[in-house]
Structure formats: C-alpha cells, structure tokens
Image (tube, rainbow, N blue to C red):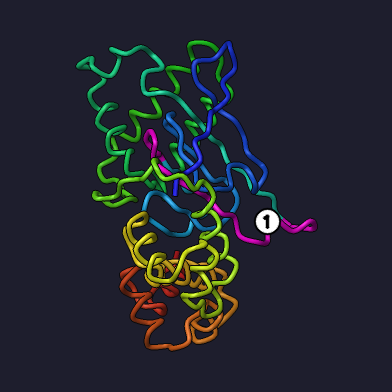
Amino acid sequence: MKPQHLKIQTNADQSFSVRKDTSPNVNNRWHYHTEVEMVCFHNGTGTQFVGDNIERFLPGDVVLLGSDLPHYWRYDSSYFEEDRAEEPHATVIHFYESFLGERFLHLPETKAIKNILEKAKRGILIRGDEAEKISQQMEKIYIAEGLNKITALLDCLMMVAGMPKIEILSSLGFKADFRAAENDRMNNIYNFALNNFKKKIQLEEIAAVADLVPNSFCRYFKTRTGKTFSKFMVDIRVGYACKLILENRLDIKQICFESGFNNFSCFHKSFKTITGKTPKLYQETHLLV
C-alpha cells in the first residue's frame, strides 16, 4: 500500500506551520509528508500508528515524527458523536529540516538537533513531566511572531535533544513501501480492524476487505507492517484494554472480553508481553498516580 502523500500548507509569511486541531477527522488516514511533524495531544484519546508501531495516544502525549514516516491517528469513536462531551484538541507543527537553509544542520552548534531529527525518522514519543514542558514550549511557538517564532522552535527541539532518555516508536527494520499502486488498501484494513476488533475477524473476511485472497493478504500485510495480522489485532485489543483499565469502570475479566479476547489467560499473557505489566499491576500503578 502506498501511504497518501500530503502537502502541508504554509503561509507565505512563515517558514513553518503551527496550528490548532479541534476535529477528529484531520489527517485521519495513513499518510506521510516531507515535513517533520511535532504534535501534542491536549485532549483526546485513540489509536496511534507510527511506522510499524501501534499503541494508544493519551492527553499530554507529544510525538515527534521525521520526514516521510507514515503515520495515522484514529480518535476513539466517542469523539465522532454529535453530542460528544469533549472535543479533541491538539497543537501541530510542521517544518522542513532545511527551513533555515541547507547548511544549518551541518553546523557544529546544531549537532544535537540533527541527531534528534535523525532519531525522529522512527518516531519519538514523549510523556510525563517532559511532555508537559514541551507542550508549554509549543504554545510559545504558537503565539510568538517573527524571529521569536523560529527561536522558540529551536528551543523546543533542543529540549527534546536534551532529554536523558527517549522512546522510539517504529522498529529499526521498518521501511515504508511508497511504490505500490493502491492508495487506499491499508486505510480500509485499518478502519475495518478498528471497527471490528471486539469480535473474531476471519482471515477470509479481512482479505476480502483488502481485495486479496487469504494467502496473498498474509504476505502483503506482513511485508508492509512488519507483523502478522493476528499480532496487529492483539496490539489493538491490548491498547483498548489499557483505555478501559484507565477508565476504571469495569473489572479485569470484563475488560478482557470487552477488548475482544475470548480467553482470559491469553489476554493476561498478551497484556503482560506488550505492556510489561499484568492487567492488575497496570491498574494498581495507575490508581497510585
């Protein structure tokens, strides 16, 4: 599948773009662009796809994406309801690596920024206190004017570069295939999976969505995502289980079946493998925060 290539609009009097998004439909598809992207989710939850990484995104998350890295954010269904109680809210910045000139990142003084942008080609996730500081800096970028806007962005990138530890999202071996002719196939697969993950999806069923025979679908999906479709579904279901645990309205066994698992021991094992914690420990850790 070829991710959709998007052209980011920039005002004629600005060297990069910064905007506020309050719609769950903004770039709500598998896409990529030449510009580097930094996004902070102030409000809203959903499923995040960055390269071959799948996980939940949460309020406060900051994500830095390098050039041409395919990505896709799918807000939870509650944000598409007409009478929704909360509106999604994100700050999004796009800039070319060379927005200050072709030689800028080759200066010795910008080595730290060059290194962090190189790491961002696999996607960087920032959470917690560090994300809060970067979110505040992104707000300064949004309201600044003229040269102050540029220096605020550089300060923000230096903050990321100075973090003692960063979380890389996509695997080292991920490589997007931009040559394939079909533009919408992966979007159809993702949307079908996200709309139906609570039930068992037959291989023939998802293969038909992709307009492929089952054997061809398995090879196609593994080649383009780096994982099997069954592993992909487990990632989605565990991510949704994390959401339900954080909401703290259902007990663990109810969450197991509500997330699409038919077997509690399988749910328990998959959850621990992906999160590093048992569902109970994950719940207790959250309740202590």
**Image quarter for residue 142?**
top right
- Residue 247 spot, x, y in % from top left: 57, 70
What type is the residue that disc 1 sits on? Tyr
Looking at the image, residue 11 sits to the left or right of residue 163; the answer is right
- Residue 20 spot, x, y in % from top left: 62, 34
Choose between 283 and 29: the one closer to the eye. 29
Give me the residue at 56% from left, 76% from top.
Answer: 198
Looking at the image, residue 20 sits to the left or right of residue 128; the answer is right
Q: What residue would you read off at disc 1?
A: 79
- Residue 153 spot, x, y in % from top left: 43, 24
- Residue 43 spot, x, y in % from top left: 60, 49
Q: Is residue 217 above or below residue 70?
A: below
Q: Is residue 180 above or below residue 212?
A: above
Does 65 appear in magenta? yes
Could you tell me if residue 288 is visible in this image? no
| Disc 1, SS | helix
Dot 1 crowding, Cα within 10 Å, few <14, some 14–19, many 20+: some
Q: Residue furthest left?
A: 108
Q: Is residue 218 above or below residue 112?
A: below
Bounds of the magenta segment: 64-85
Does 16 appear in magenta? no
**Figure label count:** 1
Give me the residue at 44% from left, 38% from top.
Answer: 133
Choose between 48 and 231: the one closer to the eye. 231
Q: Quadrant of the C terminus?
A: bottom left
